[in-house]
Every structure is written in structure tokens, then in C-alpha cells.
């Protein structure tokens, strides 16, 4: 009997020792498991969103992250432009701010330029051109004008290394506004204002074909005929161009685009304006001038695809 009792006690002691050992092993294992699970559950660090060009062109830009960056190699590398994004859209503009305003910038291999405003006074802001001639390695600022109110239309263009133009409109009241043209003869470092056309209609487009000959096209609200003004003396004076419009196209082709040179003559497309419905509203009239843009004769109708090819 005594032997049985001793055996039972020995068995109980062994069981207690084994239980204690297993418990200690369990306690030592718990932190390891917790640490392992913690490493798995720890949230991954967010990777920065890569910049994406707005189109597939190798020379391009993006307005991601509320800043302007440009690329010359299809997005492989980027250069930040030293201009505040809001300054690029200042004035009377309610469009998409994920893309730059058409005509307000140049982006080429040899010249990059952006028109924008500066200043705190909304009634009198400076219009500045920020530009680079070495693909963003260095930047320059030139003041186009120190006083401009409620900027609406804006366009920058260069037709040579030294000659360029800026066309601005603003201070709009209903269907009237002021428009101003500035020219540079030194690659954009300095700007001089031309004479005024005296026209208060809303401007639709403008440009120069050489250092002497330039054009301003007016009429964006219910135009009835082309309102194209021409200068042949570098902006010292402006006169209204005359269009010989066939009877069937009266009040159909109403808004002149900017002329281009075709050999020894000029050509211009006249579109149907915002409310045109002739043949779907996309057909344009092509007009030809043999006197440097003073008078224009109808040539042909041009379909949208033909217009793009030309």
C-alpha cells in the first residue's frame, strides 16, 4: 500500500513539473508570436505617386501635387517650374485647372515659357513671363505689363529667336473688354505695347506671321461676320480686314482664325462660331489673301479632318 502511495505521489510531482515547464515555454513564446504578427499587421508606407504627363508627347508637363513640373524625356525626369500654380489661372478663368490654358505657354526643346500674373491687388496685377532657354536649368522673369485688370484671354508666341508677342484681354463688362498687344525684339527680355485697335468686342484669337504682320480676331458671343484686324507695321496701326463672303455663307462663317502663310499668299480658316449648325457646325470656310491680309476671297469649304491635316 505504501508503495502505491509513493508511486502516485511521484507521478503527480512529475506531472506538475512538466506542466510548469510547458507553461514557461508558452509564456516565452507569446511575445515572439505577438512580435511576428505585429510585423505583419504594420501598415505599409505609402509610395509617392509618380508624375504623369498630360499627353504622350515627349516634351510635356503635369500639374499634379498642385505644382507645375515639366519633362523633356517623356516623364523619365522632371523639372519644377518656379511659378505658383494659382498664378497660371488667375483672372477670369473657370476651366479645368489640371491642364494649362491653351496659348498661355510654350513648351519646346529650345524655349519654355509661361504667362502668369503677380501681385496682391486684383484690380492691378503685373503680367509676367517666366521662361527658360536651357530646358529648365535656369529661369528668367520678364514683366510684360505692370498693370492689368481681370485677365481673360492670354496668348504667348514666338516666330523667331528674338521676335515674339503677347496678347491679353481683360476688364470685361458683359460683352465688352479691353485688349492689348505686346511685342519683344530681344527674345522676351523686354516688351513694348503696340497701338490699340479700339475694338471692345471680346477677342477670340490673335497672332503674327512675321515681325510686321499681325492679326486680331474678335467676336465670341453670337458673331455674325468675321471681325479680323490686321497690322502691317508691327502694331503701329491696325485696320479691319475685308472679307468677300459668298451669299450662301453669310452668317455661317463668322469667326476668323489666325492666318498662315502659303507660299506668296496668306490663308485663313473662318469657323462657324459657338452656335454654328451648318453641316454639323464643324465645316470651315477657307479664304485667301494676296495683299498681306487686307482683303480676303473665299476659296473652299474645309472639312474638319482636312483642316487638321493643313
Image (spheres, rainbow, N blue to C red):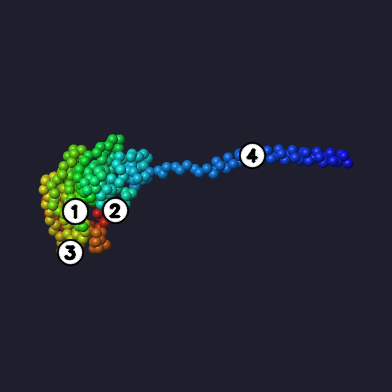
| Foreground disc of the pair 3, 4 | 4
Q: Secondary structure at mark 3?
A: helix
Which of the 4 image quadrants contains residue 176?
A: bottom left
Q: Nearer the viewer, residue 24 or 74?
A: 24
> Which residue position holds label 2?
94
Residue at the (25%, 55%) spot, across then down: 306
| Residues at marks 1 and 3, CA–CA distance in whole angstroms | 31 Å
Residue at the (24%, 59%) spot, across then down: 274
> Which residue position holds label 3?
248
Residue at the (42%, 42%) spot, across then down: 48
Q: Earlier in the sequence, mark 2 or mark 1?
A: 2
Q: Secondary structure at mark 4?
A: helix
Marks 2 & 4, CB-CB < 8 Å contact = no
Q: Secondary structure at mark 1?
A: strand
Tally of numbered discs: 4
> Which residue position holds label 4?
29
| Residues at marks 2 and 1, CA–CA distance in whole angstroms | 17 Å
> Which residue position holds label 1?
177
Q: Position of residue 103 (x, y in %)?
A: 25, 48
Instruction: Please tell me how crowded label 4 is: few (under 14), some (14-19), or many (20+) other residues with Cα within 10 Å.
Output: few
Q: Nearer the viewer, residue 149 or 163?
A: 149
| Residues at marks 4 and 1, CA–CA distance in whole angstroms | 80 Å
Q: Earlier in the sequence, mark 4 or mark 1?
A: 4
Q: Earlier in the sequence, mark 3 or mark 4?
A: 4
Q: Secondary structure at mark 2?
A: loop
Amino acid at each position: 500500500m505504501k508503495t502505491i502511495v509513493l508511486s502516485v505521489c511521484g507521478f503527480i510531482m512529475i506531472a506538475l513539473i512538466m506542466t510548469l515547464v510547458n507553461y514557461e515555454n508558452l509564456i516565452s513564446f507569446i511575445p515572439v508570436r505577438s512580435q511576428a504578427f505585429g510585423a505583419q499587421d504594420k501598415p505599409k508606407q505609402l509610395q509617392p505617386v509618380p508624375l504623369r504627363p498630360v499627353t504622350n508627347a515627349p516634351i510635356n508637363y503635369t500639374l499634379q501635387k498642385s505644382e507645375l513640373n515639366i519633362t523633356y524625356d517623356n516623364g523619365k525626369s522632371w523639372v519644377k517650374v518656379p511659378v505658383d500654380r494659382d498664378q497660371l489661372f488667375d483672372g477670369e478663368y473657370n476651366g479645368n485647372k489640371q491642364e494649362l490654358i491653351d496659348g498661355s505657354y510654350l513648351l519646346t526643346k529650345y524655349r519654355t515659357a509661361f504667362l502668369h500674373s503677380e501681385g496682391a491687388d486684383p484690380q492691378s496685377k503685373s503680367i509676367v513671363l517666366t521662361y527658360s532657354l536651357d530646358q529648365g536649368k535656369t529661369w528668367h522673369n520678364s514683366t510684360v505689363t505692370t498693370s492689368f485688370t481681370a485677365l481673360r484671354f492670354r496668348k504667348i508666341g514666338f516666330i523667331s529667336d528674338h521676335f515674339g508677342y503677347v496678347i491679353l484681354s481683360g476688364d470685361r463688362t458683359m460683352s465688352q473688354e479691353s485688349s492689348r498687344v505686346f511685342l519683344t525684339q530681344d527674345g522676351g527680355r523686354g516688351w513694348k505695347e503696340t497701338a490699340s485697335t479700339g475694338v471692345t468686342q471680346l477677342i477670340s484669337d490673335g497672332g503674327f506671321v512675321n515681325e510686321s504682320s499681325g492679326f486680331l480676331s474678335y467676336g465670341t458671343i453670337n458673331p455674325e461676320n468675321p471681325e479680323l484686324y490686321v497690322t502691317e507695321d508691327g502694331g503701329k496701326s491696325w485696320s479691319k480686314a475685308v472679307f468677300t463672303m459668298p451669299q450662301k455663307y453669310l452668317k455661317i462663317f463668322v469667326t476668323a482664325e489666325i492666318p498662315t502663310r502659303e507660299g506668296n499668299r496668306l490663308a485663313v480658316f473662318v469657323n462657324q462660331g459657338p452656335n454654328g449648325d451648318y453641316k454639323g457646325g464643324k465645316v470651315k470656310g477657307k479664304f485667301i489673301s494676296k495683299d498681306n491680309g487686307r482683303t480676303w476671297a473665299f476659296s473652299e469649304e474645309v472639312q474638319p479632318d482636312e483642316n487638321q491635316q493643313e
